[in-house]
Amino acid sequence: MKTQILGSSSLAVTRIAYGCMPLGGAWDAPSIEDTTRQKAVTAIRTALDAGINFFDHADIYSRGKSEEVFSDIWHEVPSLRQRILLQSKCGIRFENDVTGGAPFRYDFSYEHIIEAVNGSLRRLKTDYLDVLLLHRPDPLVEPEEVARAFDALHQAGKVLWFGVSNETAAQLELLRHFIRQPIVTNQVAFNIIHTHMLDEGILFNQYNPRLTRNAGTIEYCRLHNITLQAWGALAWGQLTGRSNGKPSEAVIHTSSLVYEMAQQKGVSPEAIVVAWILRHPAKVQAIIGTTQPKRITAACQADTIELSREEWYKLFVSGRGENLP
Ligand SMILES: NC(=O)c1ccc[n+]([C@@H]2O[C@H](COP(=O)([O-])OP(=O)(O)OC[C@H]3O[C@@H](n4cnc5c(N)ncnc54)[C@H](OP(=O)(O)O)[C@@H]3O)[C@@H](O)[C@H]2O)c1
């Protein structure tokens, strides 16, 4: 699979990355079932066979069980750790995790960042993370404290590179002002039916309820060499056969376009969904979160095709369910 450099790091990452969120099974299960372990190892092996070298985690996924089950792979594939790149995230905390009555919250304090990374390293059975992301912006962030935590983790060799997730350009600017290490990535929701980042750019001077007033995130990341990573890269299966609820007209129409293009190009529908993300000139890295081996392989076919400008726009406009201004 083709690789690209992640932001201003020295990491050559595959354009498609594997999202490990579902590997640990049910979030409320007290422990990891044997079938979950087998399924996780099969999914990781399939991703490796498809050429993926980058695995995305978070301390909270399945309440730590996703990181824990991932470490089973070290026994299965000797010397794998040196050949793959591990990313994890911190900064989200569950309710009642320290004292009764503590709410679900975000926490970018020095103590929590350090403690969360130590937990991830322990569960993943590794000495270092290649990349650490701050998971969701904490309104109480003290950027100097984050800088201190990043310094400590970097100096201890526990984290090599740093990034963020779900952050606006302004939030990135604030952090970058204080942090000594480069921010190499910003992971955001992005796919044909979740185009808010693009809408900001084309609707900036219009009245339109789609506007989220965060204009410039893509442009900011491109200017500062911060690779965008797309979560939800399979559009949560909504364009490729997942039946949940009553899909909108836009989803129904876009799905039929996806299948049509897939047939024309001789690839899977999942490949079209992912190729739409890869076609963006920001060189967005697509994070796919399916546990099904056949869908992992199908999605990775995206690496073999490139959508034309016309194909990309056709899907964009259809997914928005609204013509361009
Ligand atoms: N930074 C953040 O805030 C954030 C948030 C969410 C996720 N993430 C990361 O991004 C990764 C991917 O995100 P995601 O899981 O939200 O999105 P995704 O990759 O678009 O969707 C994956 C989900 O959709 C299901 N699915 C896909 N195609 C399907 C189909 N044809 N039929 C039925 N089900 C289908 C998968 O189930 P199967 O396993 O059955 O295929 C899985 O539950 C995660 O694993 C995680 O690493 C980050």
Image (cartoon, helix red, strand yellow):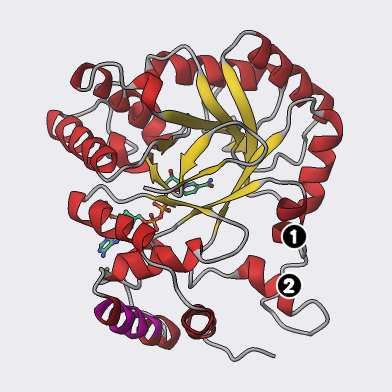
Q: Which residues are magenta?
A: 254-263
Residue at 62 percent of width and 47 percent of height: 227
Q: Judge whether 32 appears above or below 297 on screen.
A: above
Above or below residue 39? Residue 240 is below
Q: Quadrant of residue 179?
A: top right
Tag 2's secondary structure? helix
Q: Can see residue 101?
A: no
Circle 1 sits in a helix, a strand or a loop, which is it?
helix
Magenta stretch containing residue 111, yes or no?
no
How many numbered circles does the render carry? 2
User: Quadrant where the C terminus lies?
Assistant: bottom right
Which residue: 66% across, 76% down?
210
Q: Which residue is mark 1?
A: 219
Q: Residue 246 has which mark?
A: none
Relative to residue 281, is residue 305 drawn left or right? left
Residue at 77% x, 34% y: name it. Answer: 141
Name, please, the residue furthest toward the right.
Answer: 177
Residue 304 in picture, x, y percent from top left:
35, 61
Q: Measuring from the top left, give residue 50's x and y in whole percent.
A: 27, 46
Mark 1 vs 2: CB contact within 8 A: yes
Q: Left of 104 or right of it: where is 306?
A: left
Q: Give the residue at x 79% y 84%.
A: 206
Frontmost residue, 311 versus 324: 311
How dense is the environment of label 1, judged by Cα within 10 Å: few (below 14), some, or many (20 and up)? some
Question: Residue most toward the top?
Answer: 156
Three-letter amino acid code of the residue under disc 2? Gly
First in residue order: circle 1 vs circle 2: 2
Say which residue label 2 marks. 201
Q: Residues within 10 Å of mark 2 (few under 14, many from 20)?
A: some
